[in-house]
Amino acid sequence: MQRALSLAKRGLYTTRPNPAVGCVLVKDGKVIGEGFHPKAGQPHAEVFALRAAGDLAVGATAYVTLEPCSHFGRTPPCANALIAAQVSRVVMATLDANPQVAGQGLARLEAAGIATRVGVCEAEARALNVGFLQTMAGQRPYVRLKVAASLDGRTAMSSGESKWITGSAARLDVQHYRAMSGAVITGIGTVLADDPLLNVRQVSDGTPLETIPQPLRVVIDRHQRMPSNAQILKDPDSVLMVTLNPEESKLKDSAECWQYQSLALLLDELKQKKQIHDVLVEAGATLSGAFIAAGLVDELIVYLAPTLLGSLARPMFDLPFLHMSEQIRWQTVSVTPVGDDLKWVLRSV
Ligand code: AOF
Ligand code: ZN
């Protein structure tokens, strides 16, 4: 299953809206076929592994990081393919939350007399597709909020100047989160201050850049302050403007424009209209604070640089609390050195 998980990771940036899945076929202690799902519309992991194994698949054990599917989607059901290939056992890391599958793949394998086991390396497998599993289970997209701050928790000088607080290793690490997100959300304040591209330019796992779909870059710009020469508009096809009055937007002929109602409704719409499961928020203190105050952030990714920007600099989040009772506590997932900086990953409690 560990091997199947590392195969699955090869599709982490390219399969959305599908999950990243890996499969290994084993017979007599030997790997006889393996595969991963590379892209929606292409065959699933099991199909690649079965093709590689050919007739050897008879009597083999399949290790799959997700329950084999039971439905006709863009491709036919993997449960049927495993049954037809006469594997004798299927070990899966976790069940699929897609309501079209959700236990039915498992049931079909069992009905065909195939031995099954669910829950091997389950936590790792669920972490790999956390957004997919959460939205398929009926919830909002999984929201990661990234912030790069100084040791004293500051993210920009009062002028807005912020280049650079963290080092190049930390900035490369952010590319990984962009690459696995269907959307990157920012605010107009960040666009005006930094003129960012918010795209994927480099990943460190060897996935060819041209195979990675760019995330939808979402700019919340309620009062239409977006300058027409902003860098982000150089590729307007992957830009979504969110504004109070989309009808009046000067950009409505070049970029998609939606009406802003609330952050929660924006996330709902990204899920419904764009099949987005993973969202990365890269914004300043106002929008980041608003996402947190609304309880919409599932994971915080904080890069802390060993530098002091001082007490006049901007805070990470605008959260004007007065009382200890208002504090918002998080749970540490990991703390890792990245270059000279520290990466602190936290989950909401
Ligand atoms: C598997 N193995 O490798 C993957 C699965 O439209 P389709 O045919 O590509 O189906 C997409 C759905 O299939 C997706 O929502 C999820 O439920 C499942 N993904 N299942 O057996 C795989 N990627
Ligand atoms: Zn399948």
Image: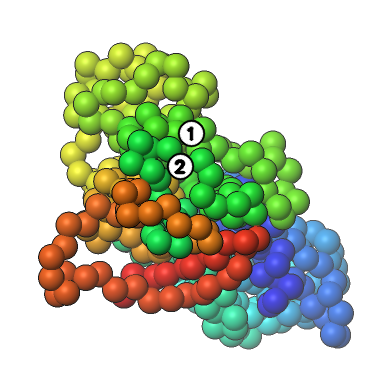
The structure residue drawn at horizontal position 83% and vertical position 61%, both measured from the top left corner, is 52
The structure residue drawn at horizontal position 85% and vertical position 71%, both measured from the top left corner, is 32
User: Quadrant of the image for the C terminus?
Assistant: bottom left
Between marks 2 and 1 in the image, the one whose residue lies nearer the viewer: 2
Q: Position of residue 139 (x, y in %)?
A: 31, 60
User: Quadrant of the image for the N terminus?
Assistant: bottom right
Secondary-structure class at tag 1: loop
Q: Write down the residue under mark 1.
A: 196
The residues bearing labels 2 and 1 have C-alpha atoms spaced at a distance of 12 Å
Q: Viewed as shown, does residue 328 lie left or right of 178?
A: left
Q: Position of residue 249 (x, y in %)?
A: 27, 18
Q: Dot 1, how many residues are within 10 Å of its Cα: few (below 14), some (14-19), or many (20+)?
A: few
Front residue of 31/198: it is: 198
* Earlier residue among tags 2 and 1: 2
The structure residue drawn at horizontal position 22% and vertical position 57%, both measured from the top left corner, is 319
Q: Where is residue 116 in the image (x, y as percent from the top left)?
A: 60, 83
Secondary-structure class at tag 2: loop
Residue 346, image quadrant: bottom left
The structure residue drawn at horizontal position 32% and vertical position 54%, both measured from the top left corner, is 311
Location of residue 280 with respect to 87 vertically, above or below: above
| Labels 2 and 1 touching (C-beta < 8 A) | no
- Amino acid of disc 1: Pro
Front residue of 308/270: it is: 308
Front residue of 295/321: it is: 321
Front residue of 260/334: it is: 334
Residue 192, image quadrant: top left
Location of residue 64 with respect to 121 vertically, above or below: above
Residue 65, image quadrant: bottom right
Location of residue 206 with respect to 328 vertically, above or below: above
Q: Write down the residue under mark 2.
A: 162
